[in-house]
Image (cartoon, grey):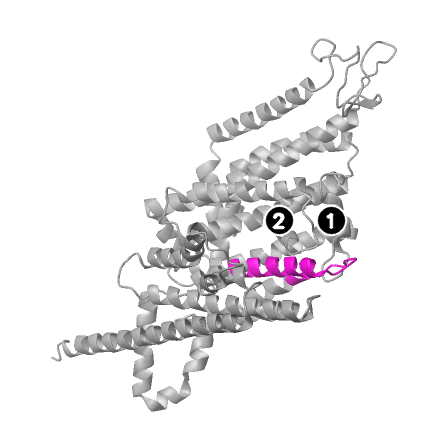
Amino acid sequence: MMLNLLDQIGDWNPQLLREIKGRLKTRNVLTTAAASLVGQLLILLYFYTQLPFEDTYSKHYDQIYNRYCTGPHNYSQPSCLKDALGDFIINWQLWWQDLFMALCWISIFSLLILGTFLLMSDLSTEERRGTLNFIRLSPQSEVNILSGKLLGVPILLYFVVILAVPLHLWAGFSAEIPLLGILLFYLVIAASCIFFYSGALLCGAITSRYSGFLPWLGGGVVFAFLMLTTGMTHGYQSLDNPLAWLRLLSPIDSMLYLFSSSYGSIEDWFDWQWYYLPVGASTLGFVGFVILNYGLWTYWIWQGLQRCFRNPNTTILSKRQSYLLIACFEGVILGCALQEEISYSSHWAFEHLFYLTAFSTILIFGLIATLSPSRQTLLDWARFRRERVSNPQGFRKSTMVPDLIWGEKSPAVVAMAINIVIVAIPLVTWSLFGPFDSDEKTQMLFCVAFFVSLMMIYATITQIMLMMRTSKRSVWATGTIVAAVLLPPTILGVLGIDPYHNTIPWLFSTFPWAAIESAAINTMFMALLAQLSVLTLLNLQLRRQLRIAGESASKALLEGRRSLPTG
């Protein structure tokens, strides 16, 4: 029967069968089962030690206080009462609830962190052994191969968690937690695992050559993200801004929404809205929105996986996909900002504009790295364009503008301009129709204008750096952008130049927003004009490099053809 099951798995997904055979060895299964059961036993013993005992708990005025007692509260904990037999009366429902929540926390951190590490480590190992290219040449589809990885690589981790499900259900039922809530939690966990694991596969597929450090970095990033969102629940972070979208990507808020409504700022989720729709008012509505959010971004990750798995040198997304992605992101994030507020103050609106800009900036930098083609791709495109120019009939059939907007191999500057304009539309709308006075609206519009020009400058610099002959083009491009973003404001800060009293140095730096509140309109306009001049010069330099590259490539190709034997 087992062989028949394996045969069926092999027919459905050969990659999954390969992963199962490599990991489900008898020794591995027994070790994993023992670790899971021992871990559950240790958790039970720990919670057992938290119960009140006469000899182990300190007394205050001959009274014992413990979290699980049922008497009057004092010193932040209830006092302990005894029954007729002299035994402590225990609040077993609370005890089981704490055990249930502990298992929830452990499962979230274990599945997401360890699963991410295992998947990225597996791809790095495959690359190091040379088997990853063999897998890429497989006739199976990308979805089939990568889903086999996603299901098979962490299979022992799944086994550990599955063995803990009976104890988890028992604790939940003993704590009188509804079965529907537990099942919804499992659904959220599954969706979050698919999302994070898909991201791990994407990162591993495009950076598998950096084998040693990458898995630890991936696991560390997931751990930092979970700790960040956990801190937000402790810090009573407001949910009436786009930052709520970030918390929706963490299963921690969903867990606390389902099982611990009095925890931190979780109560705010019950009033949370998206485009004024009361999503948080219904448990099914909230969980459904979380699942859809995971599904949406998982879909985009898999779009990138299908493009770059077999060819890691291609861009993760096409230009057409980037326009849809940025529009989709802006639509989702803007919905998180539109809440029914009691009062719309300029401070509230500025805070929302700040979060919108911050998230958009991160996405724009990601798209710069995603859409910028490699040097060889640009050389091929430049040669192709030169040949089309020399052939007017063919050139009329394929104009430059559509190629720059939609072409796979053309420079990404025009595509980035379109993406930045898509980002700027909601920012401009927010600035114009927000609760700002005329001076504040002018300042907000200048903020958006500086944002657009600087993002275009960074995109152009990246494309120019990727034209370098060195093999470390990506490192040079990344270092240049980081230096351009961080060095000017850092130097000004170290020199003690105050943006409120010395606005000109800040306006002409890469962080002009610090001085906008105190700067004159004429000064801001001159600074913006200077940025546009820099952008124009950079694009002229890029155009010159592409023209020279096209001429050189065409000349080399022509000389190669002439050197071919004719006989």
- Say what amino acid the circle numbered 1 marks: Trp
Is 339 included in the stretch rendered in magenta? yes
Task: Please give the residue where the numbered disc 2 appears in the rendered image.
Answer: 191
Which residue is at the far bottom?
393
Q: Nearer the viewer, mark 2 or mark 1?
A: 1
Task: Please give the residue where the numbered disc 1 appears in the rendered image.
Answer: 269
In the displayed structure image, the side of residue 188 where residue 140 appears, left or right:
left
Residue 234, given in percent of the width and then of the height, sits at 66, 39
Secondary structure beneath label 1: helix
User: What label does residue 183 carry, if any?
Assistant: none
Q: What quarter of the picture does the N terminus occupy?
A: top right
- Above/below status of 214 relative to 170: below
Could you tell me how far apart the alpha carbons at marks 2 and 1 are, in whole angstroms?
Answer: 19 Å
Magenta-colored span: 334-362
- Above/below status of 497 relative to 67: below
**Residue drawn where x is 55% and y is 25% of the image:** 34
- Whether label 2 touches label 1, CB < 8 Å: no
Visible in this render: residue 186? no
**Residue drawn where x is 43% and y is 50% of the image:** 494
The mark nearer the N terminus, 2 or 1, is: 2
The answer to which of 423 and 248 lies nearer the viewer is 423
**Residue drawn where x is 52% and y is 36% of the image:** 156
Q: Quadrant of residue 128?
A: top left
Residue 314, given in percent of the width and then of the height, sits at 40, 63
Neighbourhood count class around disc 1 (C-alpha, 10 Å): few under 14, some 14–19, many 20 upward: many
Q: What quarter of the picture does the C terminus occupy?
A: bottom left
Which residue is at the far front?
501
The answer to which of 31 and 326 lies nearer the viewer is 326
- Say what amino acid the circle numbered 2 marks: Ala
**Residue drawn where x is 43% and y is 76% of the image:** 404
Is 206 included in the stretch rendered in magenta? no
